[in-house]
Amino acid sequence: MSVAITEADLTLTGTAQAKMSDLFQQVDDSVQGVRVFATAGGCSGVSFGMTFTDVINDDDGVLAFDGFKVVVDDGTLDYLRGVEIDFVDQGDGNATFIFNNLPQMGGGCGSCGSSSGGGCS
């Protein structure tokens, strides 16, 4: 049985929720949610990504929205507490989900791991 996570753990802006809802209308019924994951690497030590998933494991946390679920494994959730996921469309074909309020994790270059969601510069 998966564990419910709350908006104290992870939030999505209204823009991100709308885009995610649009994306879920385009996938087949086998997709159970969008999995947010962490991978080692980069100067901050951790990078984040998202992918559709057709499996929700017993140790996954689930944040349910109208029309979709965000799924996070328990190891990744420790890195994401307090993070806000936003969707930014700059209008020139450059649109992406970004992670705001990332925790400071140390690192050795530029603005890696910045609390404003920036990357390496």
Image (cartoon, rainbow, N blue to C red):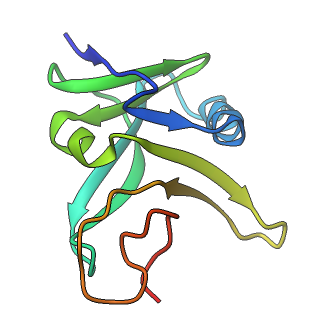
Q: Nearer the viewer, residue 55 or 43?
A: 43
At x 23% / y 27%, what residue is drawn?
60
The answer to whether residue 56 is seen in the rendering is no
- Among all residues in the image, which is located at the extreme right? 91
Residue 55 position in % (x across, y down): 28, 27
- Image quadrant for the N terminus? top left
Q: Residue at x 26, y 49 (%)?
A: 79
Q: Is residue 87 above or below residue 107?
A: above
Residue visible at 24% across and 66% down in the picture: 105
Q: Position of residue 99 (x, y in %)?
A: 49, 55
* Residue 85 in view: yes
Q: Position of residue 121 (x, y in %)?
A: 47, 89
Snapshot quadrant of residue 34: top left
Q: Residue at x 82, y 73 (%)?
A: 92
Q: Is residue 31 left or right of residue 89?
A: left
Q: Where is residue 80 shown, x and y percent of the image? A: 33, 45
